[in-house]
Amino acid sequence: MRRWILGLFVMSLAFTALDVRANDPVVIGTGGETGVYYATGKILCQLFESKDIPCEARTSGGSIANLKALAAGEITLAMVQSDWQFHAYRGSSDWDGKKIEDMRSVFSIYPEPMQIVTKRDANISKWNALKGKRINVGNTTSGHRKTFEEMVPPGRWKSWLGEVYELPSNEQVAAFCQNKFDAFIYNVGIPNGDMRRAVAECNGLIIGPQSSTIRKMATAARPYFVKVVIPAGTYRPDQPAVKTFGVMATLVTRSDLDAKVLNALVDAVFGDIDSFKKRHPAYAHIDPKVMATEGLSAPLHPAAQAYYQQKGMLH
């Protein structure tokens, strides 16, 4: 009798542990408070909470910081650039020997064009004119910093750039407006409030990389990059269209995330995609089939894959 009671007690503990695990708050690694990653995290949390799943959108240093936190089990979901999803899953670039094998894709959301913002009075209207100028390249854990390093290897910085700054994205626009440097680079969805301030209020000018750089970056060898055009008038009426390249903003998780939890999110997003598009200007032109397939190097989480197959979203 004692063994039977003890067995029931152990089973009860096991089920309780499972319930607690399933009901743990979802934590989403995002970015700086003024960026689209953080706004997206808050929006996704609203969708989770509409399904009675507690959720926290946690600020961070960006893609690299989010991937490290995901690997360490500190967060449930991570917003990351498609290039760093690629490298982290394959164990390449900065992730050599540190691949995150249990990372799984959920969906991509919107393109993040590489934007180079300069001062209109600094005589920097072309990429080559950045030579010798003061530039903010971003903090070391940001995805756009790593993308810039792929464009211009750090070994060339001393000979090509002037003074180099490493401010995070939530500090760079204020410093730019105070004339602490001549230009900064930023991979971010458009439109973006910080970019609008830099261009409209602080005499900023958006330029793109030279055509040869765009061709070099957006190739089959780098499937995580896409060609992007920033529409004319995005930040001020006289702003011309800017050709550039970019990454996709993606959402990833680990393979052990409870299927019911993830299904609640994908159903909330894709079950009413028109409503989701209205939640942020960066989502205006998203396509569900693109979200389910493009910019995703890690395998889809089984719950996401099953949902997309059921809805006919996979090619």
Image: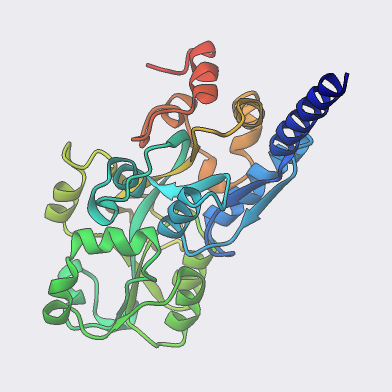
Q: Quadrant of the N terminus?
A: top right
Colouring scheme, one of rainbow, by chain, secondary structure, one colour: rainbow
Query: Extreme front residue here?
Result: 2
**Within the image, what quadrant is residue 105 found in?**
top left
**Within the image, what quadrant is residue 158 found in?**
bottom left
Which of the pair 18/250 is nearer the observer?
Answer: 18
Instruction: State the image coordinates of residue 244 (x, y, percent, origin top left).
Output: 27, 52
Instruction: State the image coordinates of residue 195 (x, y, percent, origin top left).
Output: 47, 65
Does residue 264 appear in the picture of this structure? yes
Asked if residue 13 lies left or right of residue 170, the reply is right
State the residue at coordinates (44%, 49%): 80
Instruction: State the image coordinates of residue 66 (x, y, percent, origin top left).
Output: 48, 55
Total labels drawn? 0
Q: Quadrant of the C terminus?
A: top left
Asked if residue 113 lies left or right of residue 92, the reply is right
Instruction: State the image coordinates of residue 128 (x, y, percent, origin top left).
Output: 15, 70
Does residue 118 appear in the picture of this structure? no
State the residue at coordinates (49%, 38%): 254
Which of the pair 75/32 is nearer the observer?
Answer: 75
Asked if residue 303 lies left or right of residue 118, the reply is right
Which of the pair 202/134 is nearer the observer?
Answer: 134
Which of the pair 55/68 is nearer the observer?
Answer: 68
Asked if residue 170 lies left or right of residue 166, the reply is right
Q: Please say if 90 is above or below 179.
A: above
